[in-house]
Image (cartoon, grey):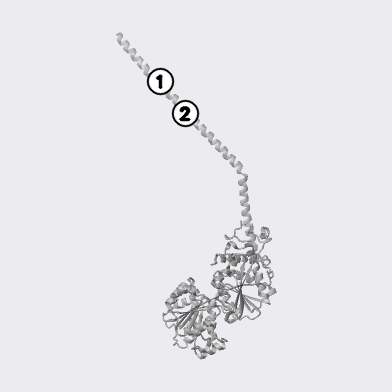
Amino acid sequence: MSLDWSKLNIQQWLKDAIGSLGFQTMTTVQASAIPIFLQNKDVVVEAVTGSGKTLSFVIPIIEKMTRVEHQKYHVNAIVLSPTRELAQQIDKVFQSVLQFNPEENGIRTQLILGGVNTLEQDLETFKKRNPHIIISTPGRLQELIKSKKIKTTDLEVLILDEADRLLDTNFSKEMDFILASLPKQKRTGLFSATISKAYETLHKTGIRNPIKIKVNAKNNKPKSLQMYYHVVKPEDKLNLMFKILTEYHFQKAMVYFPTCVSVDYYYQFFKTLTQYKDQLKFFSLHGKLKTPARLKTLSNFDASNDGKTILMTTDVASRGIDIDDVDLIIQLDPPTDPDSFMHRCGRTGRAGRFGQAITFLNEGREEDYINFLEVKDVDIEELELPFEKGVDLGLTSWNLQDRARHDKAVHAFVSFVRYYTKHSVNSIFRVGNIDWSSLAKFYGVTRLPSMPEINKKDSNVSEFIGDYDFEKWEQFKYLDENKEKARVDELAKEKKKFERQEIKKKKEENSAWSVKVGKKQARNEKNINKRDLELDMKGEDDNESEQEMDWKDMIRAQKKQKKNEKNDDIAQFDDL
């Protein structure tokens, strides 16, 4: 297998462009994939991150586009990406090569992303630009096809970059529609660093007898990338991270936080550390930012060359982001998806450049993650640091200056716990093993929030952290006067409610004896009245019996008298 670009059957200006861009020889994946794709065969390429996959489909697409008869409103090639950031990176690679095209207004591309322009604006640009190649995300491409303003009958090439993500359930609705709308007669290329999970869904793409190319699967990392782990208490992570950032030599670094809320929270804090202002420059990027803000941040980070530059981010920047001169990766916590671990680490050590990736693990159960990675054929070494806890940044003191800051700290704390409960390797990452006090110190939280995951009745769990108590908590103020007034009013309202409840409770306690005696007296009176009624009823029955007896005696006396009178009459008759 030749790694010489000159051996490829492509146009001379493409070879010149590649040389001008500094690509002296092909990488293994490029040497394997490009010749096959040029031969009109479908390919499924699994190669390590940073191995040059993007150029592996950019060159064949451009070569094919030089031979097509492009018609108005027809698209000849589509490249799909799961994220806007990756789509932007792909477009950047296309433009870097196409700038050497000798034909004026030759092969044209259009980057189409949801959240940047409206659908109407994208369609208007499509009409004016009449592109050969569209680089897009699934949602916006689905909208374009539904508009019936673009024609796909002449489609020559379909590329799915990060194909495993595009073929998972998150994009199933969009991808099913797109794939059903495209012609069957086309060349299809699937590219990813971890595509094995998507093999069972490959039939959806219409791919036919693909050539499967798997490069450097063992260990799944380039040789120029060194990966380390360091076991640490949660409360020491932040200070240790800053010690690494100040002591290590690097140009660009990416620090991965577990959640979007964490990025926002720590970014606000880091901006206040004036002692590092001239030494470290921070950017923040996460999925909840609006698309223009995300793309602008990524562009500014890429263009920055002033001292040490750090991008604080989440998994939104774990795949397909090719930033020059990223020398260092720090993961404050391992990702919930094990595949993302290698994607994060792969943001450095790209294209033969040296890079280091450091992952922090909490003491205890999380140390088993190393064995888990070994099973995945990922070699990672323990990092011995010449310093232990690093510098104290004063996060808790900063929080205690304004209750609003503490509110954000609690929000970040809660979001982390939710993140932790969703970890796919839950046999290792168990909520029950979290050191709540140490985690609270990491986030600068002085009072643990009420959460079902936290059992405050546990003797090992303290509601207040450090020397903080309820009295200090009540005096903790907002710097914002309106917020503080609302808090004080709410406290007063709660106090009155509590006082009313206490008065009612005491009243019930004080009146309990008299109420009990009253009930007893009422019960006794009821019993007495009942007995009197029974006696009265009995007396009436006796009187009735006596009256009945008198009446019977009177009847008997009358009968006897009549009988005697009759006998007297008979006697008198006899005398006659």
Which residue reaches farthest right?
Answer: 275
Report if residue 130 is visible in the image: no
Q: Of the residues shown, which amino acid type is indicated by label 1?
A: Met
Q: Nearer the viewer, residue 149 or 408?
A: 408
- Could you say whether the residue bearing mark 1 is in a helix, strand or loop? helix
Point out which mark residue 554 bears.
1
Point out which mark residue 104 bears.
none
Q: Residues within 10 Å of mark 1 (few under 14, many from 20)?
A: few
- Above or below, comparing residue 469 to residue 31 in the picture: above
Q: Quadrant of residue 295?
A: bottom right
Q: Of the residues shown, which amino acid type is indicated by label 2?
A: Glu
In percent of width and height, residue 397 lies at: 68, 66
In percent of width and height, residue 2 lies at: 52, 86
Q: Is residue 387 left or right of residue 366?
A: right
- Above or below, comparing residue 346 to residue 18 in the picture: above
Q: Is residue 61 left or right of residue 511?
A: left
Compute the Cα span from label 2 to label 1.
21 Å
- Name the quarter where the C terminus is drawn: top left
Report if residue 506 is visible in the image: yes
Q: Residue placed at 54% from the left, 88% from the top?
A: 17
Q: Residues within 10 Å of mark 2 (few under 14, many from 20)?
A: few
Q: Residue placed at 62% from the left, 52% from the top?
A: 500
Q: Nearer the viewer, residue 491 or 206?
A: 206
> Considering only order in the chain, which callout, 1 or 2, is on the residue closer to the N terminus?
2
- Could you say whether the residue bearing mark 2 is in a helix, strand or loop? helix
Q: Which residue is mark 2?
A: 540
In percent of width and height, residue 324 lies at: 59, 81
In percent of width and height, residue 341 lies at: 56, 72
Q: Quadrant of residue 176?
A: bottom left
